[in-house]
Image: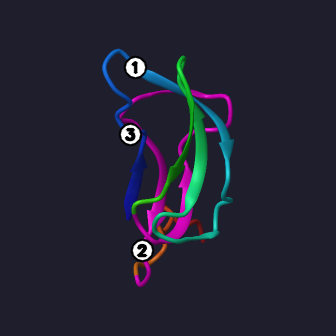
Amino acid sequence: MAQLLIPPMGEGTTEVVITQLLKQVGDHVKRDEPVYEMETDKAAFTIESDVEGILEKWLAAENDIIPVGSAIAVIRAAGELAELPLSVKS
């Protein structure tokens, strides 16, 4: 599993606002494909994935304020097994 992180945005920027999620859980994501949009107090950015795989889960929602460097999504690489629940009830 790989985590997508909020990229460093330069000196003085410590958090961003997630403005739009461009993929849904279960979608295939290609490397360098846009996956979400974010905004700082200075500019708006479309962020591309640095890995290829299946979007397992979003760790943030639209309009959330997220610290720079935080994980925003989990992507399962091709060939990796999906996450299993921690406990299974019979």
Look at the image and tell me in which quarter the N terminus lies.
Answer: bottom left
Estimate how packed mark 2 is, as few (under 14), some (14 to 19) or many (20 or more) residues with alpha carbons within 10 Å: some
Residue under the image location 42 percent in, 39 percent down: 6
Amino acid type for the residue under numbered disc 2: Ala
Total numbered labels placed on residues in the image: 3
Residue under the image location 47 percent in, 67 percent down: 83
Position in image of residue 62 (x %, y %): 68, 36
Which range is magenta? Answer: 51-79
Residue highlighted by disc 3: 7
Work out whether residue 43 or residue 74 is closer to the camera in this orientation and state it.
43
Amino acid type for the residue under numbered disc 1: Thr
Secondary structure under tag 3 reads: loop
When asked about the image quadrant of residue 38, the answer is top right
Q: CA distance from mark 1 to mark 3?
A: 11 Å
Position in image of residue 7 (x %, y %): 38, 39
Secondary structure under tag 1 reads: loop
Residue highlighted by disc 2: 77
- Nearer the N terminus, badge 1 or badge 2? 1
Residue highlighted by disc 1: 13
Image depth: mark 3 or mark 2 in front: 3
Secondary structure under tag 2 reads: loop
5 is within the stretch colored magenta: no
Estimate how packed mark 1 is, as few (under 14), some (14 to 19) or many (20 or more) residues with alpha carbons within 10 Å: few
Q: CA distance from mark 3 to mark 2?
A: 20 Å
Q: CA distance from mark 1 to mark 2?
A: 30 Å
Amino acid type for the residue under numbered disc 3: Pro
When asked about the image quadrant of residue 69, the answer is top left
